Image (cartoon, coloured by chain):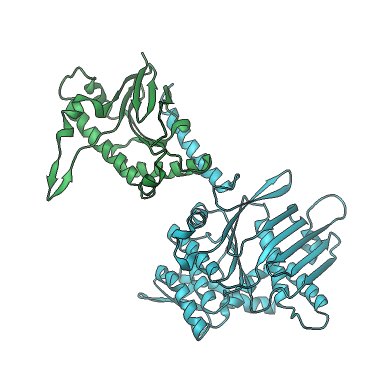
């Protein structure tokens, strides 16, 4: 059965080659688990984050995907893109997701096979990190690809510790086999 | 902003790789982008030769038209170094006899033009008082000259070395003494950012060579990296007035040998120079440099006032043996940008490798 996930007004459909696909930050295991780790240290707020999508491929490995849609609110988010804060934010979400999944794998839950996902971290297994970025600020496709290339290299440096393959993509440019994406009503509007 | 005479249009007909193109230049920074062999350097060298010949031919002399032609013939042959010193070699290659022309128009009126036949005959025209020696033009080639400028001057003047004369001209410009007085203060302000990157100042040593003095000591040019030599050259050229208000700067691949930090500084210097009245023409293959200049074009109001200037982009593409030109206000507006094309291709290549990691 294809697995359908609606994130940020976009519909992601993973085909049968993906045995698990879920909105991780919507799971009880996250909400009742590591997300509760928050508070203040020396009056500085500390909290936990998580990526939007987890998907386990039958043979290839684990995909962790963060989805950001900046279409329709260009000015408010332009500076975030420029200073690459979005890359850091995505990388921090990856960090906390990995920690949360290790915890989740220590108990059997009906929500999803956390142990199978945790096993995907093992040596010789591939990890895929994707930042799905929709933006309408770029004038032409080549310029947009060049910007995505720069962001991809930046993301790689931030998740180097995880030894994952990284890619920053947008709708028509994604290269994930077995995944189809459509816009839901209201996509691209503020 | 200075209000000197600026080049408004250059038209090339059957010259070099161009069949018939016209480029409408802005008074500030003009950025020529194209793959190799699309005629960027030839275009700049042709216009530079025409300006230099005009500079060397005082307007109010007898036989000024003849003198301009003589100066231009000499300049074209020494800058392009064609075989047998024949300017006919500059005509676009086709079967049969033909001629090629270059026309330069200026914002305040006046024109320079020449026509060369494949048999090597040159005719040249100058309409109106175009540029004077108070509006100097300078060509900076892609290789640095600072480390051997004094030897090059001596060798060039005493022997028959077939060196592209833009190097000799630059060597002479570097050898000029620094300015004094009010203009020197303005120049010192202009180079302050460059000196910050270099961590010191350029000075002339007893033997005439140009050294860099910073907190670690004095460094002769051969001990400096090529990138630093280029920035030190730029300092010197500004401080000695070779690059001045109302002048013209042609710079072939400014990015050569520069690290990214220096390229960002060069992008800033180009804007500062243009804002102070120098009309600039660069040919480049560099993404960082062109992106910085394009951002300045896209966000003029957000730039420091001293850096606000006109910027225009020219994309040169070659097809079927002839080159066409597209003009645009920003880098994005250039439909066919070979620099961006390669970056986009690199992204696609990485995407394909990523895709192959996941079985279908």
Q: Is residue A190 left or right of residue B288?
A: left
- Residue ranking furthest to the top: A1
Indicate the quadrant containing the N terminus of chain A: top left, top right, bottom left or bottom right: top left
Q: Position of residue B215 (x, y in %)?
A: 35, 75
Residue A115 makes an appearance in the image: yes
The C terminus of chain A - image quarter: top left
Query: Compared to A112, does B144 lie above or below?
Result: below
- Is residue B204 visible in the rendered image? The answer is no
Chain letter, green in picture: A
In the picture, measured across the screen, residue A60 lies left or right of residue B130, that is left
Q: Is residue B79 left or right of residue B196?
A: right
Residue A19 picture location, percent across and down: 32, 18
Q: Position of residue B345 (x, y in %)?
A: 53, 40
Say left or right for A21 vs B21: left
- Looking at the image, residue B214 lies above or below residue A89: below
Chain cyan in the figure, letter: B
From the viewer's side, name the closer residue of B226 and B179: B179
Q: Say which residue appears at 25% left-offset and 38% top-offset.
A: A95
Residue ID at (69%, 73%)? B52
Q: Give the tally of numbered discs.
A: 0
């Amino acid at each position: 059965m294809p697995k359908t996930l609606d994130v940020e007004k976009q519909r992601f459909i993973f085909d049968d080659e993906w045995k698990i696909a879920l909105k991780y930050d919507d799971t009880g295991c996250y909400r009742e688990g590591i997300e509760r780790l928050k508070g203040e240290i020396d009056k500085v707020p500390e909290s936990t984050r998580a990526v939007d999508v987890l998907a386990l491929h039958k043979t290839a490995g684990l995909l962790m995907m963060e989805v950001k849609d900046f279409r329709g609110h260009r000015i408010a988010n332009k500076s975030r893109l420029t200073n690459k804060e979005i890359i850091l934010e995505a990388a921090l979400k990856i960090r906390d997701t990995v920690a949360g999944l290790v915890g989740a794998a220590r108990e059997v839950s009906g929500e999803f096979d956390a142990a199978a996902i945790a096993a995907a971290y093992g040596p010789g297994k591939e990890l895929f990190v994707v930042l799905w970025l929709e933006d309408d600020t770029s004038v032409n496709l080549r310029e947009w690809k060049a910007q995505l290339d720069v962001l991809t290299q930046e993301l790689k440096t931030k998740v180097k510790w995880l030894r994952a393959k990284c890619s920053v993509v947008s709708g028509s440019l994604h290269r994930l086999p077995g995944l189809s994406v459509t816009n839901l009503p209201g996509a691209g509007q503020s | 902003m200075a209000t000197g005479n600026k080049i408004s249009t250059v038209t090339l007909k059957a010259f070099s790789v161009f069949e018939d193109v016209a480029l409408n230049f802005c008074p500030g920074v003009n950025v020529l982008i194209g793959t190799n062999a699309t005629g960027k350097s030839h275009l700049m060298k042709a216009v530079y030769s025409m300006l230099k010949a005009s500079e060397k031919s005082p307007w109010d002399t007898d036989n000024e038209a003849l003198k301009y032609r003589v100066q231009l013939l000499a300049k074209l042959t020494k800058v392009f170094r064609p075989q047998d010193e024949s300017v006919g070699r500059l005509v676009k290659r086709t079967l049969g006899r033909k001629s090629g022309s270059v026309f330069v128009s200026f914002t305040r009126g006046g024109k320079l033009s020449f026509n060369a036949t494949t048999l090597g005959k040159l005719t040249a025209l100058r309409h109106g008082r175009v540029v004077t020696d108070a509006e100097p033009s300078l060509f900076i080639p892609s290789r640095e000259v600072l480390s051997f400028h004094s030897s090059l001057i001596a060798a060039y003047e005493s022997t028959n070395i077939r060196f592209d004369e833009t190097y000799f001209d630059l060597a002479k410009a570097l050898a000029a003494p620094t300015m004094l007085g009010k203009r020197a203060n303005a120049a010192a302000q202009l180079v302050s950012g460059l000196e910050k990157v270099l961590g010191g100042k350029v000075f002339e040593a007893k033997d005439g060579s140009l050294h860099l003095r910073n907190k670690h000591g004095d460094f002769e040019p051969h001990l400096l990296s090529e990138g630093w030599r280029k920035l030190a050259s730029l300092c010197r050229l500004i401080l000695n007035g070779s690059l001045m208000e109302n002048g013209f700067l042609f710079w072939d691949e400014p990015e050569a040998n520069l690290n990214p930090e220096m390229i960002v500084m060069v992008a800033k210097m180009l804007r500062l120079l243009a804002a102070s009245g120098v009309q600039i023409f660069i040919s480049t293959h560099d993404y960082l440099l062109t992106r910085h200049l394009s951002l300045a074009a896209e966000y003029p109001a957000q730039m420091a006032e001293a850096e606000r200037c006109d910027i225009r982009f020219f994309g040169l593409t070659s097809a079927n043996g002839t080159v066409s030109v597209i003009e645009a206000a920003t880098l994005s507006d250039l439909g066919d940008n070979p620099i961006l094309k390669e970056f986009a291709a690199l992204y696609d290549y990485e995407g394909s490798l990523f895709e192959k990691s996941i079985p279908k």
